[in-house]
Amino acid sequence: MTSSRSDRDRAVLSCPNAASPNSALLDTPLPDSALPDSALLDAAVLDTAMQSALAAALDGPRGANPLVGAAVIAADGRIVTGRHLGAGTPHAEVDAITRARAAGIDLTRSTLVVTLEPCNHTGRTGPCTGAILDAGIPHVVHAIDDPNPQAAGGAALLRARGVHVESGVRAAEATALNDRWFRAYREGRPFVTLKLAQSLDGKVAAADGTSRWITSAASRAHAHTVRTRVDGILVGTGTVRADDPQLTARGADGALLDRQPRPVVLGSTPLSPESHLARNPRTLHLGAGDDAGDEAPTPLPDHLRTAAAEGISHLLVEGGPTVSGAFLAADLVDEIHLYTAPILLGDGLPAVRGLGATTLLEAHRFVLDAADSTSSNPAVLGPDVLTRLVPAPAPSPDLPSTSTPEI
């Protein structure tokens, strides 16, 4: 059956902030030759849909789980996207399927495109393979395989159940999307977010040591929301001695929020028995025995592997300048949340120490993060500015250059 472009539905890409799955749609037609008459589609359609899925993935926040986006391609050419918005929320495939159903799409004549192989395990949510099979989707295309053996195997299961499965579409872009997450997984450590709260001139305390509070209540409220998303919060023994923190996540009224991270302390100095963290049975003290005997201190990556073995998949580092510098110098920081207050402190305590950069060529470089795209970046928080940063990628001949400025 043939038809003209005017009497076909246009390909539609769902807007991240749309109130419904098919509202605020991009009015861009697919080529006549690409509009499908069956579930199996040509390369042009799959490429367009995968680009949409990659863009949708950026709606999610970085952390314990990789960024994932999905797109359902209807038999009439419409494309409806879904995304994963963090641990405990519907996976991208389920989100896309739900939105496609709401848009009246016949899933039994559709193709599902996803940036990462559909999972085949049950965590906080059920396996995506089950949702795909229940929907009757006959064709699935994923960009790259899942490296996690606990989640992998979805493609093989779908094939065994009669689903046509392909992979490799825009694989380089899908790999780059989660480059640091994949690295953390390969190294057997948590994904690490470094929090810095500083003055305009990069100080975290005044010359007399006072630091409460450099940033505003709005910044602190945001930081406590981030704490609810992580599995652990790390500080050094120096911070414990100076501030006696509790490392809890609290609301504006001071009440504990529903999800609490595990406190983590780094350093060989014993904790005072009267400190909050020493009295908390959940506190994980890394390096507590490092000063025993003549053995060299435990390397930082080994400490992180211990944290991972304790179930910490996303670690928020809120340590002082020495701890922050150690993580940065070891290239163990996967993202930075930089809260900057509009004040100048002059002779104060610098935010970072021990980077080891003696020339500009040795500078540690970062770029603005495009993830969590439903929030602006930089973002204004009261009088402060929050900037979310990720390590600048090494130039690659396989990927187009980015216009995102280095910081």
Image (cartoon, rainbow, N blue to C red):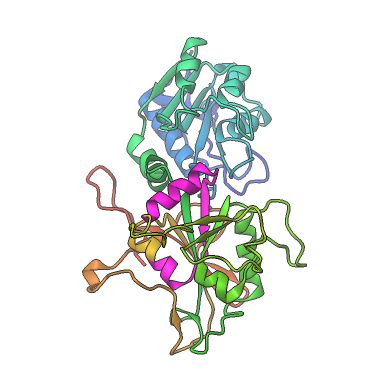
Residue drawn at the location 42% of the way across and 54% of the way down = 334
Residue 165: image quadrant is: top left
Quadrant assignment for the C terminus? bottom left
**Which residue does the image show at 77% across and 67% down from the upper left?**
253
Q: Position of residue 178 (x, y in %)?
A: 42, 44
Residue visible at 61% across and 23% down in the picture: 131
Which sits in the foreground, 22 or 346? 346
Residue range (magenta): 299-325
Front one among 223 and 159: 223
Q: Is residue 55 magenta?
A: no
Left or right placement of residue 316 versus residue 274 in this view: left
Q: Is residue 196 visible?
A: no
Image position of 262 (left or right of 236): right
Place residue 216 in its image quadrant: bottom right
Q: Nearer the viewer, residue 112 or 406?
A: 406
Q: Please say if 347 is above or below 134.
A: below
Q: Is residue 367 left or right of residue 161?
A: left
Q: Is residue 328 visible?
A: yes
Percent of width and height locating residue 295: 34, 57
Outermost residue to the front = 293
Residue appearing at x 77%, y 62% in the figure: 255
| Front one among 358 and 173 | 358
